[in-house]
């Protein structure tokens, strides 16, 4: 065995995870590549799912010369990701399936697979960094390439996961990753990034819900804040708070989704200024250090959307919940999405937005 130990690398078939595996091999780790089979749905051929992605991952392993396996996690994915995806839409929330997958599958079930194989570490191609501080606690840091930083989607990682996880491309720019793929002679060097909902054919969430949860996709009303019917829709589950396009409403000013009433299958729309919220309440809260930085409210930056901005807030922890009050009102705090707290490059933790307040 290598002096650096063994590592099970999650290989999606994309350039980032492929380079991560090759870098670790070059650094002296005993690498085993694994492609996670997550779905068994007809028509899934894009992103990190489907035969083409599996073939690309296998070819990279063949070229680099390390062992490779298919890790079947379809049952776990059905339960924790797709099941949660449907359940969240049933109550009018917009889920974050990528964050759910990272917490339950890539750093949950996949770690268990590493244990079964007697492998020391797991690694992914995520653009994040980790380091062990002087207090011996592991810290989760943003990726050096801020345009590719994925720390928002990994806010749930704790000490157990970080102690065993490696992120070889977290300190690289995307251009550097592609240059390394060329140097390693990998056929995925110019493969485009996946931007789609990986488990849904064509990446269409509404269509996917119509197929696996048809009870969610039936006609309902689009109303203004006073309850006046403005239009009709084909299923409230296809909408999210803050959405502007596809509302079927015309007027002198743009309209946005303000609220989703799942019980009534009703979508409430109105002017953008009504989206402004002073703060949010979140549940499913986890802290990277194992707990919040103290028991009193503290100052931090928060982010409520993956590609959103970090904004100053006062965060009040309380058990598995937190309350975040923004210094300036924010738009588009969608229930079901993640709120992530940070200070500088360090991610403190986060949770699921349960509700917002004015």
Image (spheres, rainbow, N blue to C red):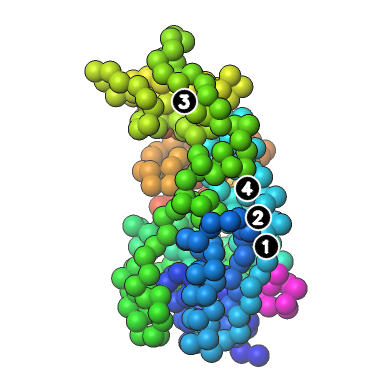
* Residue highlighted by disc 3: 233
Please tell me which residue lies in front, 64 or 217.
217
Spatial separation of the CA atoms under disc 1 and disc 3: 35 Å
Q: Are marks 4 and 1 in contact (CB under 8 Å)?
A: no
User: In the rendered image of this protein, does residue 135 appear above or below residue 266?
Assistant: below
Question: Is disc 1 placed on a helix, strand or loop?
Answer: loop
Residue visible at 49% across and 81% down in the picture? 60
> Gap in Å between the C-alphas at discs 4 and 3?
23 Å
SS for callout 3: strand
Find residue 73 and name its label. 1
Marks 1/2 in contact by CB < 8 Å: the verdict is: yes
Instruction: Report the residue marked by disc 4.
Output: 82
| Residue 262 sits above or below residue 4 on the image | above
| Magenta-span inclusion, residue 115 | yes
Q: Are marks 2 and 4 in contact (CB under 8 Å)?
A: yes
Mark nearest the camera among 2 and 3 is: 3
Circle 2 packing at 10 Å, graded few (<14), some (14-19), many (20+), is: many
Q: CA distance from mark 2 to mark 4?
A: 6 Å
Q: Which residue is mark 2?
A: 77
């Amino acid at each position: 065995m290598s002096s650096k130990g063994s590592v099970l690398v999650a290989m999606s078939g994309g350039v980032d995870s492929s380079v991560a595996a090759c870098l670790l091999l070059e650094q002296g780790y005993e690498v085993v590549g694994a492609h996670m089979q997550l779905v068994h749905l007809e028509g899934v051929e894009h992103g990190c799912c489907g035969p083409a992605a599996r073939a690309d991952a296998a070819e990279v392993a063949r070229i680099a010369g390390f062992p490779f396996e298919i890790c079947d996690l379809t049952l776990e994915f059905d339960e924790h990701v797709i099941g949660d995806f449907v359940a969240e839409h049933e109550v009018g929330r917009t889920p974050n399936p990528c964050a759910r997958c990272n917490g339950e599958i890539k750093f949950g079930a996949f770690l268990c697979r590493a244990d079964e194989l007697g492998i020391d570490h797991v690694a992914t191609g995520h653009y994040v960094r980790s380091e062990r501080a002087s207090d011996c606690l592991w810290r989760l840091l943003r990726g050096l390439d801020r345009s590719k930083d994925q720390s928002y989607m990994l806010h749930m990682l704790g000490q157990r996961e970080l102690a065993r996880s490696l992120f070889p491309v977290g300190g690289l720019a995307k251009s550097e990753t592609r240059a390394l793929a060329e140097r390693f002679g990998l056929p995925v060097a110019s493969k485009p990034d996946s931007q789609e909902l990986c488990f849904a054919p064509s990446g269409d969430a509404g269509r996917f819900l119509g197929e696996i949860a048809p009870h969610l996709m039936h006609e309902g009303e689009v109303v203004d804040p006073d309850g006046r019917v403005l239009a009709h829709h084909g299923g409230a589950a296809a909408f999210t708070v803050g959405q502007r396009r596809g509302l079927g409403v015309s007027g002198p000013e743009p309209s946005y989704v303000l609220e989703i009433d799942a019980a009534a299958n009703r979508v409430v729309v109105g002017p953008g200024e009504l989206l402004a919220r002073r703060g949010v309440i979140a549940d499913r809260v986890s802290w990277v250090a194992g707990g919040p930085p103290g028991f009193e409210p503290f100052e931090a930056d928060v982010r409520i959307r993956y590609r959103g901005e970090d904004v100053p807030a006062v965060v009040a922890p309380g058990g598995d919940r937190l309350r975040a009050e923004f210094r300036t009102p924010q738009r588009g705090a969608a229930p079901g999405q993640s709120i992530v707290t940070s200070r500088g490059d360090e991610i403190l933790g986060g949770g699921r937005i349960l509700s917002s307040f004015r």
